[in-house]
Image (cartoon, coloured by chain):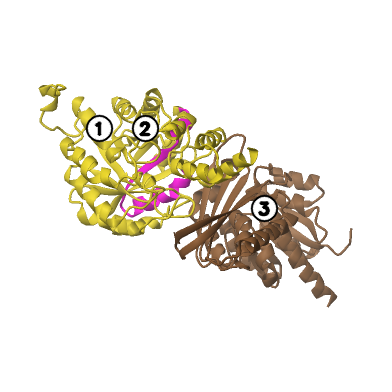
Chain colours: A yellow, B brown
Amino acid sequence: MTSMPSPEVALEPPSEPRFRLTDSTLRDGSHALAHRYTAEQVAAIAGALDAAGVPVIEVSHGDGLGGSSFNYGFSAQPEIDLVRAAAAVVKRARLAVLLLPGIGLASDLEEVHEAGVSIARVATHCTEADIAIQHLRTARDLGMETVGFLMLAHMIEPDALLEQARIMEDAGAQTVYVVDSAGAMTTHDARARVAALKGGLRSETQVGIHAHNNLSLGVSNSIGALEEGVDQVDACSRGLGAGAGNCPTEILVAVTDRLGWSSGVDLMAVMDVAEDVVAPIMPREQVINRAALTLGYAGVYGSFLLHAERAAERFGVDARDILLELGRRRIVGGQEDMIVDVALELSRRT
Amino acid sequence: MSTSRIPVAIVGSGNIGTDLARKLLRSELLEPKVVVGIDPASDGLARARAWGIETSAGGVDWLLANAERLGIRIVYEATSAGIHATNAPRYAAAGIVAIDLTPAAVGPAVVPPVNLGAHLDQANVNLITCGGQATIPIVAAVARVTPVPYAEIVSTVASRSAGPGTRANIDEFTETTAAGLVSIGGAAHGKAIIILNPASPPILMRNTVYCALSAGADQAAVESSIEAMAAEVATYVPGYRAKGIVFDDGPFRTPGGEAAGRVTVLLEVTGNGDYLPPYAGNLDIMTASAVRVGEGIAARLASEVRA
């Protein structure tokens, strides 16, 4: 038997949470399910996360509002139905959506806001923050809480990331996230970016971390970010998300409990959500297979994994060769169409 | 050179106006008489002067005061949507046909190989978007041989070639382009996606067109129609090419209903490098299409003169 956590840590009465946990199983997890969530599954997961005390639950197509498409995969059910299913069951948790300018529209926020979503997370590639100004302002005008989401943040240096974060802050973002979409950051990388934003943004602006597990660092990078004072942390139940998956919610809660940092979430309950509610609907467990590891190694957007595996089979090439080539060309999030383009080129070479 | 070239003016001396002036110098039907800006120190005006084109920093007031002297029949608007909305009625009152490269959409949208012929009599036409100019011809090429219940495009442009207007209102790009896939391309439903890529050196403009296909669609006919259309666009946008045409079996649950299959067309646009760098294929296709539209209108004006 392993020993239990030391009592003075584990049994301390719950204090004010040290960070706010956003569970993205119903958004980032959409990638792993090829966007096949049903309203029934969404209600079961959102209800269970809410009961466990998870404060924020994100629900959207993996590529955000309007992501249902040939390029990213069509949603099995309209996402507004999924949002309504979540809204119908949550009692305490607040609902969030993701929106990528260029894919979804600012006006898409109106319908989900009416359905009960109160947090708009507006995502851009880490160098393109200014295309989010329109959408962040729309969200504020609707009275929504606003989050700016700087994706593939490993691709630029911390000071350059801060400049982009300031553009989002000036546009009304109340929080700016460091998003490791490729799961390519070492813990040093994550800490340096969080520290730059914490040090350089206004004191009332919060900072978040969104970590993936392609290099097996999802939890460590989240903990490193917390040590730098990050205010919000994303995680997914059982790690269900793009690539090798995300920082797993239940493991984050367990580790932060051990560190004596309250998440406000019931550990046993989120373990049950992972095992009893989420695991049964997963098409496969989140493992760091060779393609997923290549994503992290090459710095490629995590949601490319399943598309690259399909293209590899279709064109008779190695998924890793596709991903390495995409990394070499510095392809950004949303460019899923380049996977077939590259696979076709590679197949013609052989 | 024939003396019957139609005199045209360019309003706006930024990247687009200057690249357009350079292209118009090569036209056999159009003569760039004047480039009008508002900043006497602009590089665009200096370039135009160096190319032997008259220039003025006096704005549209100057142009309208001098239009008769210069014989201007067509004006290209390369400013902004707000400015064109103000200028459009003034051009119309002066009897000058306006070709609008801004998102103002005062007049109907034209995509040369698809619907230019239907709009040659308009007093004002609009060039829609760069993504629309690149992709709508392909959708139309598919739609002319088989119904397209749903078309979707992804335009990826180099960050450095996406101007402040596009960045401030990226939704306008996607909504306008999606509407054009339907109203001009002939799809029943449309969706447009734009991605900005900051890679250095900058990437060439990339477009992907997806069209949903019904079960009975003739793939060979679809493919040859696409190839013919790509060749036609390349006659006025030399750097335009279809890199690949891929057919997939569905079913796909699209907004236009369940589709048995789809065709994916991978397009690349290399700019001509006139004033703008070659990677800015998105801007090149706008100015090249603008020349094509102007030539169509010029031919119509010339035939009126003869009649």
CB under 8 Å between callouts 2 and 1? no
Q: Amino acid at mark 3?
A: Ile
Identify which residue, A73 or A291, lies in the foreground: A291
Magenta region includes residue A142: yes
Q: CA distance from mark 1 to mark 3?
A: 51 Å
Which residues, given as a range, are shown in magenta?
A130-157
Above-or-below relation of A97 to A288 = below
Q: Is A167 contained in the magenta span?
A: no
The mark nearer the N terminus, 2 or 1, is 2
Q: Position of residue B127 (x, y in %)?
A: 63, 60
- The N terminus of chain A: image quadrant: top left
Q: Give the residue pinned by disc 2.
A: A213
Question: Where, by quadrant of the figure, is residue A213 drawn?
Answer: top left
Q: Residue A169 in the image: x percent, y percent?
A: 39, 40
Amino acid tagged 2: Asn
* B49 with respect to A83 (left or right): right
Q: Residue at x 80, y 56 (%)?
A: B27
Depth check: A137 or B177 in front?
A: B177
Residue B185, by quadrant, is bottom right
